[in-house]
């Protein structure tokens, strides 16, 4: 870029922040801008904001609703912004080597996104920690368990038929997720702080498992042998389908979301209700139920590595984050719980991303110390 191709003020600004010249100029606002750009950490902070900004959404909200006449002055401002983005990138690399972590930043590095981890509790009481290693475990009656980076899988090709089912339990702790393939080929994804109790081989006329927490099922169809998911608030019966179940202990609420197929959900009063695709049934501990049509991706995205929120209460969002990042939430103001947010972010983003997103979207303050997040106004 040639210096004489820029206006005098732009040339002065660029020289000021890149060459630190002391050349005077009669423009207080420009001086303040130059001072801001030279502040330690200021540009890197703005660049992080720029990386998280949803340009497409902003374009749709601001540009698409109606046609507007754009003044030449506004175009000049836009041009200046483009120039400053390039300059800011240069300043960012200049400042980066000099920066040192503050105490708060050191605390933040202790909190990480969840990973693939779980514990397998066998029917004989043996507990096995599941990591990324490939392992083969011999069960009884010719049944084998294969464990690798993709999860856990039961091989029953050489198995002898059992007279009574033997149950294993897969436990996923806070800050974890895991997946498995059951003996009938049914695939199950378990979210953080969840567990699944299941037989190593299905016997009898039904296929029954129990879940606490959140799980997504892709059930293999078997005529005349329904698949039954047991929860603390009722059972879900299917023949072959994809659905999500959320029933965390202490919540006294069961939420079943059907992606495809058909399921029959038992209600506390002894009745049952059949769900169609894109329907969601919520059942409370007091017996109240609510059936509605939903966009299922907002309730199943977790298994695909995403957080999706649409006008969701802050308390409900932070509850999900607390399980995934294994943190504790403390509120200094009850009003913030009812603030609503929309957004989509990878589950593997640093938690700082979420904190800054909240603070820039509403008048809230979030402070992370160790693994405790304090939320207030």
Image (cartoon, rainbow, N blue to C red):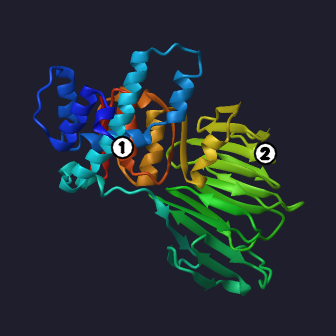
Residue for point 42% across, 43% down: 51
Residue that lies at the very extreme toward the front in this rendered image: 4
Residue pointed to by mark 2: 264
Dot 2 and dot 1 residues touching (CB under 8 Å): no
Residue 327 at x, y percent in the picture: 37, 51
Q: Label for residue 109?
A: none
Residue pointed to by mark 1: 48
Residue for point 67% across, 41% down: 296
Residue 77 at x, y percent in the picture: 37, 24
Nearer-the-camera pick, 8 or 352: 8
| 101 up-or-down from 296: above or below | below
Residue 23 appears in view: yes
- The quadrant where residue 111 appears: bottom left
Of tags 2 and 1, which is closer to the observer?
1
Q: Secondary structure at mark 1?
A: helix
Residue 294 at x, y percent in the picture: 68, 35
- As measured in the structure, the alpha-carbon distance from the residue carrying label 2 to the one carrying label 1 is 47 Å
Callout 1: 10 Å neighbours few (<14), some, many (20+)?
Answer: few
- The quadrant where residue 18 appears: top left
Please state, as top left, top right, bottom left or bottom right, where the C terminus lies in the image. top left
Q: Secondary structure at mark 2?
A: strand
Residue 161 at x, y percent in the picture: 80, 80
Nearer-the-camera pick, 348 or 330: 348
- The quadrant where residue 364 appears: top left
Please state, as top left, top right, bottom left or bottom right, where the N terminus lies in the image. top left
Nearer-the-camera pick, 207 or 158: 158
| 348 up-or-down from 365: above or below | below
Residue for point 44% across, 36% down: 315
Callout 2: 10 Å neighbours few (<14), some, many (20+)?
Answer: some
């Amino acid at each position: 870029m040639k210096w004489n191709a820029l206006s005098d003020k732009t040339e002065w600004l660029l020289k000021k922040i890149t060459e630190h010249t002391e050349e005077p100029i009669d423009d207080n606002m420009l001086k303040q801008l130059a001072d801001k750009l030279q502040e330690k950490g200021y540009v890197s902070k703005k660049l992080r904001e720029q990386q998280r900004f949803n340009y497409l959404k902003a374009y749709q909200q601001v540009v698409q609703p109606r046609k507007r006449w754009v003044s030449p002055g506004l175009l000049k401002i836009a041009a200046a912004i483009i120039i400053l983005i390039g300059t800011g990138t240069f300043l960012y690399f200049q400042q980066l080597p000099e920066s040192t972590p503050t105490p708060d930043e050191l605390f933040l590095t202790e909190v990480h996104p969840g990973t693939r981890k779980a514990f397998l509790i066998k029917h004989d009481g043996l507990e096995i920690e599941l990591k990324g290693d490939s392992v083969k475990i011999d069960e009884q009656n010719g049944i084998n368990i294969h464990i690798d980076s993709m999860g856990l899988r039961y091989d029953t090709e050489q198995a002898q038929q059992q007279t009574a089912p033997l149950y294993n339990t897969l436990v996923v702790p806070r800050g974890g997720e895991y997946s498995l393939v059951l003996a009938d080929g049914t695939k199950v994804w378990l979210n953080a702080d969840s567990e699944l109790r299941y037989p190593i081989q299905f016997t009898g006329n039904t296929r029954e498992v129990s879940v606490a927490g959140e799980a997504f099922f892709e059930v293999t169809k078997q005529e005349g042998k329904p698949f039954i998911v047991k929860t603390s608030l009722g059972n879900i019966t299917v023949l072959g389908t994809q659905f999500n179940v959320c029933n965390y202990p202490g919540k006294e609420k069961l939420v079943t979301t059907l992606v495809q197929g058909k399921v029959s959900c038992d209600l506390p009063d002894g009745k049952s209700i059949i769900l169609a695709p894109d329907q969601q049934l919520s059942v409370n501990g007091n017996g109240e139920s609510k059936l509605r049509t939903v966009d299922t991706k907002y309730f199943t995205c977790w298994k695909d590595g995403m957080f999706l929120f649409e006008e969701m209460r802050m308390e409900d969002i932070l509850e999900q984050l607390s399980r995934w990042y294994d943190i504790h939430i403390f509120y200094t103001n009850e009003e913030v719980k009812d603030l609503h947010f929309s957004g989509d972010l990878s589950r593997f983003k640093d938690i700082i991303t979420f904190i800054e997103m909240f603070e820039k979207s509403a008048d809230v303050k979030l402070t992370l110390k160790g693994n405790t997040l304090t939320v207030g106004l």
